[in-house]
Amino acid sequence: MILDNIAADTKIRVEKAKKKVPFSEMRMQAHLKNSNTGFPFEKMLAKPGIHYICEVKKASPSKGVIAEKFPYLEIAKEYEHAGAGAISCLTEPKYFQGRNEYLMEISEAVDIPVLRKDFIIDEYMIYEAKVLGADAALLICALLDDELLKRYLRICHRLGLSALVEVHDEEEMDRALEAGARVIGVNNRNLKDFTVDIENSLRLRNRAPEEILFVAESGIQTAEDVARLRAAKVNGVLIGETLMRSEDKKAALCALNGGGL
Ligand SMILES: O=P(O)(O)OC[C@@H](O)[C@@H](O)c1c[nH]c2ccccc12
């Protein structure tokens, strides 16, 4: 499966990174940063209504290159001005053409929380996320066993980073809850065949208790999609491709929100 290949490549990437900045050094740098953040990503999602996590993504394994022109800083600022609640920034280089620098520069340039979107398979990447300026990091349930998931959640929270724990089905949802996830994202994209179905989020919504912040991810294209998720009391929607392909991000976000934001 694609996820196995990405995980294998990510492992090689992390080993290389550790040669430049060793683990102990990265961890120390992360601990030098302020951990008393108040978790702005979670605070934003906890406000009433539905919130938009807008993704800065050049390419993906399912779609190839999405944005030939990729002025990532401008895109991030446009999202912020359009009313985004947070920005999701891909840092995976091979499959998504992301870069750590994008995250670092974007987090400097905007005032809203920034999520590191990557395939975290080593705690080094959590410390790195903190050093790069992230407010939140994605933890993909399918890549981590129960023990690691718990451990990585604890590391995130100690650093003042929120963790968006990504699940695909009931079993992973239960694992995420058991591990102590405070924010759960349901990915509507099936990573085996790349089909997307927002029913996945709608179906899993009620399996998480009220106090858990809930994000619907992937394949969100229309105001009707957002309206259905809003009605299901989803706290946030993570949208990439639809916005990346829109010339006018503000107009696109307004339209998705049903006419205004
Ligand atoms: O472009 P879309 O279909 O709106 O999807 C955004 C986001 O959900 C998707 O990029 C994503 C969801 N989970 C991921 C994990 C890794 C990389 C990317 C992702």
Image (spheres, helix red, strand yellow):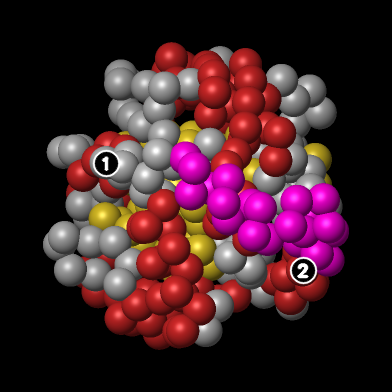
Where's residue 90, x and y in %? Answer: 64, 44
Whether residues under marks 1 and 2 lie with C-beta atoms below 8 angstroms apart, the answer is no
Q: Residues within 10 Å of mark 1 (few under 14, many from 20)?
A: few
* Amino acid identity at mark 1: Gly
Quadrant position of the N terminus in the picture: bottom right
Amino acid found under the numbered disc labelled 2: Lys
Q: Nearer the viewer, residue 139 or 60?
A: 139
Residue 231: mark:
none
Dot 2 crowding, Cα within 10 Å, few <14, some 14–19, many 20+:
some
- Count the marks: how many? 2
Image vertical order of residue 227 relative to residue 78, above or below: below
Q: Residue under label 1, please give it.
A: 38
Verify whether residue 65 appears in magenta.
no
Residue sitting at x 43%, y 58%: 156
Which image quarter: residue 45? top left
- Residue under label 2: 11
Secondary structure at badge 2 equals: helix
Could you say which is closer to the camera, residue 121 or residue 197?
A: 121
The x, y position of residue 41, in whole percent, is 35, 42
Identity of the residue drawn at 62% across and 16% down: 74
* Residue at 58 percent of width and 27 percent of height: 106
Q: CA distance from mark 1 to mark 2?
A: 31 Å
Residue 9 image-quadrant placement: bottom right
Q: Is residue 68 left or right of residue 57?
A: right
Chain-order first, disc 1 or disc 2? 2
Residue interval drawn in magenta: 12-33
Give the image location of residue 159, x and y in percent: 41, 52
